[in-house]
């Protein structure tokens, strides 16, 4: 019999127990995959939001729950525009609301003569009214209802930014009025002077004005506390799931060793070294983990999409299943297998062949 066949045979001796153990570990794997994919999607969202109009970086209010909750005074733009290293600035208001029945739609307020608006590529129509992104699904002449007002779509634009292209652009003052925040904006986009490093300019502005400058997508968690919270909760739950899953696998493998004491004694008696016995037990534990991994990845993908859909995040946050997300799922599953096999392996190796053969 092959090694794989032996491992498979041992696991199928108690198929219900094996499946229940794998299912418990799978829940932990699925939870980790779901949380990490949502966290990755949130970071991607925040990263996309900082480069509206292809700005070098964005300025936000510090410590807000997410980037769209940031509020900065419009008057701050003039002071920033005159700072050393700043070439251009643009006011941006991001307003998440219902547009024509589409919940959590993004309405973007831009000042018409600033670079964020001028860099929009008009695919069709004119810039005289509401501009719909080419992925929003509106047509020229259609009227969009936002709050208590309706706006005719006069143009379709493309920017290359997935959030802009899925949103609607209106004049800045109009969006400020819709959001009931006159004199405030969500973000100020900044283009650095030629020859200046954006990160250097951003750091100077942060220190001077007490705000948060986001240059790289990975820095988005500095302003987006919800993203940071998801990441922190994900790690805490990962540790707890690792402990609980490890206990489950340990219990299953310990029972398996107890039930096979005579078999292990026979194997030792016919010449199997201790390291081979240990490898067999570890292989069985890893076999359970791999079954759990297959189930857990499916559970995680499904849970992530259900969570974003049910919480209204689907428009702004899409779960991002990177190699790193799946890598953590694999590491978690294998880690549980190794941890779970530690005690049963130690117990099996302590048995002498004679003692094992005497057991009933």
Image (spheres, helix red, strand yellow):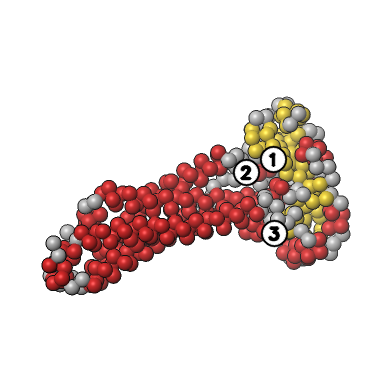
Q: Secondary structure at mark 1?
A: strand
Q: Give the residue pinned by disc 2.
A: 316
**Front label number (3 vs 2):** 2
What x and y, as percent, mark residue 230?
57, 53
Asked if marks 1 and 3 touch (Cβ < 8 Å), the reply is: no
Q: Secondary structure at mark 3?
A: loop
Q: Is residue 340 left or right of residue 151?
A: left
Residue 96: mark: 1
Crowding near the residue tagged with mark 3, few <14, some 14–19, many ≥20 C-alpha atoms within 10 Å: many
The image quadrant where one finds the C terminus is bottom left
Q: Secondary structure at mark 2?
A: loop
Going from the N terminus, do you reach mark 1 or mark 2 first? 1
Q: Is residue 288 left or right of residue 355?
A: right
Crowding near the residue tagged with mark 2, few <14, some 14–19, many ≥20 C-alpha atoms within 10 Å: many
Q: Give the residue pinned by disc 3.
A: 215
**Mark 1 and mark 3: Cα distance apart in space:** 23 Å
What x and y, as percent, mark residue 89?
81, 53
């Amino acid at each position: 019999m092959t090694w794989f066949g032996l491992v498979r045979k041992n696991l199928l001796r108690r198929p219900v127990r094996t499946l229940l153990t794998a299912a418990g570990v799978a829940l932990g794997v699925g939870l980790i995959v779901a949380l990490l994919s949502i966290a990755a999607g949130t970071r991607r969202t925040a990263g996309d939001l900082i480069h509206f109009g292809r700005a070098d970086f964005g300025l936000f209010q510090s410590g807000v729950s997410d980037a769209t909750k940031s509020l900065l005074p419009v008057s701050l733009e003039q002071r920033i525009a005159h700072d050393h290293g700043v070439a251009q600035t643009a006011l941006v208001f991001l307003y998440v609301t219902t547009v024509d029945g589409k919940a959590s739609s993004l309405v973007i307020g831009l000042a018409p003569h600033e670079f964020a608006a001028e860099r929009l590529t008009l695919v069709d129509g004119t810039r005289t009214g509401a501009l719909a992104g080419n992925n929003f699904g509106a047509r020229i002449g259609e009227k969009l209802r936002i709050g208590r007002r309706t706006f005719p779509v006069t143009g379709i634009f493309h920017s290359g930014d997935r959030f802009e292209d899925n949103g609607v652009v209106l004049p800045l003052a109009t969006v400020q009025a819709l959001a009931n925040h006159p004199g405030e904006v969500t973000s100020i986009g900044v283009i650095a002077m030629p020859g200046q490093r954006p990160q250097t300019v951003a750091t100077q502005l942060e220190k001077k004005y007490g705000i948060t400058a986001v240059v790289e997508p990975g820095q988005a968690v500095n302003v987006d506390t919800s993203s940071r919270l998801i990441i922190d909760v994900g790690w805490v739950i990962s540790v707890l799931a690792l402990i609980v899953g490890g206990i489950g696998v340990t219990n299953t493998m310990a029972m398996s060793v107890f039930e096979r004491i005579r078999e292990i004694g026979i194997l030792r008696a016919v010449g199997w070294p201790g390291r081979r016995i240990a490898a067999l037990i570890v292989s069985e534990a890893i076999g359970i983990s791999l079954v759990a991994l297959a189930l857990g990845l499916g559970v995680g993908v499904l849970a992530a999409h259900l969570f974003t859909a049910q919480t209204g995040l689907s428009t702004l946050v899409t779960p991002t299943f990177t190699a790193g997300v799946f890598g953590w799922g694999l590491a978690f599953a294998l880690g549980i297998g190794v941890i779970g096999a530690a005690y049963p392996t130690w117990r099996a190796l302590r048995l002498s062949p004679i003692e094992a053969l005497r057991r009933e």
